[in-house]
Image (spheres, rainbow, N blue to C red):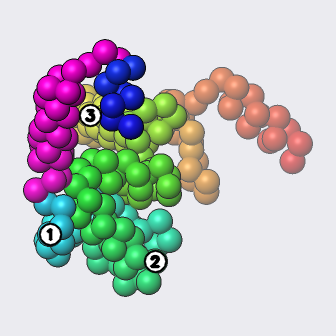
């Protein structure tokens, strides 16, 4: 079969041998330089697994990190992380895979894009608005005189002072006195 290949492509035997040697060398080099080739075969340590799991949250429990969750599903997720680390997958790629499978809830924070950006902006805006309102109110309080102004309306059960009588109120009083 090799002779048909050589004759078909007009290659001499030495060219074919040299090409096969180069291809074998490239294959060995690609295998050695492949990402994660040095760690493939060694199982990742518990610290390496928990370093990834600390940045992910359980999609079933609210607010529980994946490294501390005791559900069987979370144990399986940590095993997936271990398998992916053993295969040489990076931490960010593992997080991206979990987001693709379970949604952005596994990140424990809303994504900083689109409508979810409001979850990041609104609390800061509310704090600034509250601080502005407190500043405005404090300045208004300090500008008012310390003594309270007397009101022109009488308190129930007390007669109105004669010097500060409103003409409309005086007319109402006169009408009421005439009806009695």
In magenta segment, residue 10: yes
Span highlighted in magenta in the image: 9-38
- Secondary structure at badge 1 equals loop
The label shown at residue 42 is 1
The quarter of the picture where the N terminus appears is top left
**What residue is drawn where x is 43% and y is 83%?**
71
Is residue 149 something one can see in this rendering?
no
Q: Mark 1 and mark 2 in contact? Answer it, CB < 8 Å.
A: no
Counting from the top left corner in percent of width and height, residue 137 is at 32, 35
Counting from the top left corner in percent of width and height, residue 52 is at 24, 61
Between marks 3 and 1 in the image, the one whose residue lies nearer the viewer: 1
The earlier-in-sequence mark between 2 and 3 is: 2
* Gap in angstroms between the C-alphas marked 1 and 2: 24 Å
Counting from the top left corner in percent of width and height, residue 151 is at 48, 37
Between marks 1 and 2 in the image, the one whose residue lies nearer the viewer: 1
- Residue located beneath label 2 in the image: 73
**What residue is drawn where x is 89% and y is 42%?**
179
| 65 or 142, nearer to the observer | 65
The earlier-in-sequence mark between 1 and 2 is: 1
Hey, which quadrant is residue 153 in on the image? Answer: top right
**What residue is drawn where x is 18% and y is 72%?**
43
Left or right: 3, with 41 as reference point:
right
The earlier-in-sequence mark between 3 and 1 is: 1
Is residue 29 something one can see in this rendering?
yes
Q: Mark 2 and mark 3 in contact? Answer it, CB < 8 Å.
A: no
**What residue is drawn where x is 35% and y is 21%?**
7
**Circle 1 crowding by C-alpha within 10 Å: few under 14, some 14–19, many from 20:** few
- Secondary structure at badge 3 equals helix
- Secondary structure at badge 2 equals helix
* Gap in angstroms between the C-alphas marked 2 and 3: 50 Å
- Residue located beneath label 3 in the image: 135
Counting from the top left corner in percent of width and height, residue 96 is at 37, 48
């Amino acid at each position: 079969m090799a002779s048909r290949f050589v004759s078909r492509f007009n290659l001499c035997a030495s060219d074919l041998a040299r090409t096969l040697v180069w291809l074998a060398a490239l294959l060995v080099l690609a295998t050695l330089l492949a990402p994660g080739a040095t760690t493939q075969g060694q199982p990742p340590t518990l610290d390496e697994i928990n370093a990834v799991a600390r940045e992910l949250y359980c999609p079933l429990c609210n607010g529980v990190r994946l490294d501390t969750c005791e559900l069987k599903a979370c144990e399986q997720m940590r095993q997936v992380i271990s398998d992916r680390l053993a295969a040489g997958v990076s931490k960010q790629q593992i997080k991206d895979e979990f987001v693709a499978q379970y949604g952005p809830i596994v990140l424990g924070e809303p994504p900083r894009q689109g409508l979810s950006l409001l979850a990041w902006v609104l609390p800061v805006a509310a704090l600034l608005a509250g601080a502005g309102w407190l500043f405005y109110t404090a300045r208004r309080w300090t500008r008012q005189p310390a003594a309270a102004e007397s009101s022109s309306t009488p308190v129930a059960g007390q007669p109105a002072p004669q010097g500060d009588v409103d003409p409309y109120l005086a007319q109402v009083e006169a009408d009421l006195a005439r009806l009695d």
